[in-house]
Amino acid sequence: MYKIIKKRNLAYKLCLYEIENERLARVAMPGQFLIVKIDDKGERIPLTICDYDRDAGTVTIVVQEVGATTKKMNELNVGDYLQDVVGPLGNESDLISMNKDELKDKKIVFIAGGLGSAPVYPQAKYLSSQGIDFDVILGYKNKDVLILEKEYRDLKCNLYVCTDDESYGFKGPVTNVLKLLCSGKIADADYKDTNGKVVKGKEVIKSSDKKKYNHAVAIGSAVMMKFACITTKELGIPTVVSMNTLMVDGTGMCGACRLMVGDDLKFCCIDGPEFDGHKIDFDSVIKRQAQYKDEESRALLKLNEGNTHHGGCGNCGG
């Protein structure tokens, strides 16, 4: 049993949990993930490590409510317990294994879409602690679902926030901002502050120089990573993506997370979760992720209806 010692509502249906687990906190590394189970009947949920505190003996995860199990998880509060937390699993980020001289030669940009800002954060935090310069682009649908902005602003990095509906920051999506940075035109782009006031980018950024990146990390939905990789390929920027959303078992036994990386068959949980984004067939990934939507929807409906649920649809077994 693993105690929840902190809960924070980040946005609608999105919660941050700090979990007491001294062993995990001692060995966790950026890029790795956990398998979480709330009770003996619960689904196994793979969640990337968002942060860890070795001194306090805690690990941090972010949970987005997308189905029945994550809905139950986000109903837990401080003092409640998770039945099982397994990890850390997967491999640490490639950036973590590089020495300081190697990192200094890198011109790094992190591209995070929505919930992807959670798994990007520990990598960014690590680089900041090593005194490495890097840029971060955070993209969201709107400012109401913006998360972890303060945490990123506390790091030593150049931060660029954008929204699809243009309600805050630069005009999204993230690929637009990346192109502006690489063209040196970000200073002339419109930026909306928290009050909706439009100012020029030069009033909110640290530098308007044309960026020349040689390493990108893109994490978010499969669709977001697909278009991020199309853009970075056009710009000639080698790109790493995280495919943790494909995982089920997390130990290489079920085979559900198999993935073609170029001509090689890989398993996300044991070979990844990070891979060369320019070698991923994102169209097949997007198609696979849609396979279980009906089952998940029926499970959520059953949970929401409780005792009134009778299986009238004829498909859920109620």
Image: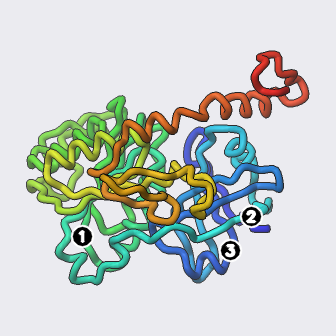
110 or 253: nearer the eye? 253
Say if mark 3 contacts mark 2, CB within 8 Å.
Answer: no
Q: Which residue is mark 2?
A: 84
Badge 3: residue crowd in 10 Å (few <14, some 14–19, many ≥20)? many
Taking the image as shown, residue 131 lies to the left or right of residue 85, namely left
Percent position of residue 262, x then y: 30, 52
Percent position of residue 294, x then y: 64, 28
Q: Residue at x 74, y 28 (%)?
A: 301
Taking the image as shown, residue 56 lies to the left or right of residue 122, namely right
Q: Secondary structure at mark 3?
A: loop
Q: Residue at x 41, y 56 (%)?
A: 265
Label placed on residue 133? 1
Badge 2: residue crowd in 10 Å (few <14, some 14–19, many ≥20)? some
Q: Residue at x 56, y 76 (%)?
A: 53
Q: Which of labels 2 and 1 is toward the front?
A: 2
Give the mark nearer the N terminus: 3 vs 2: 3
Q: Secondary structure at mark 1?
A: loop
What is the three-letter code of the residue carrying label 1?
Asp
Cα–Cα gap, marks 3 and 1: 31 Å
Give the mark nearer the N terminus: 2 vs 1: 2
The C terminus, quarter of image: top right
Q: Quadrant of residue 71?
A: top right
Q: Secondary structure at mark 2?
A: strand
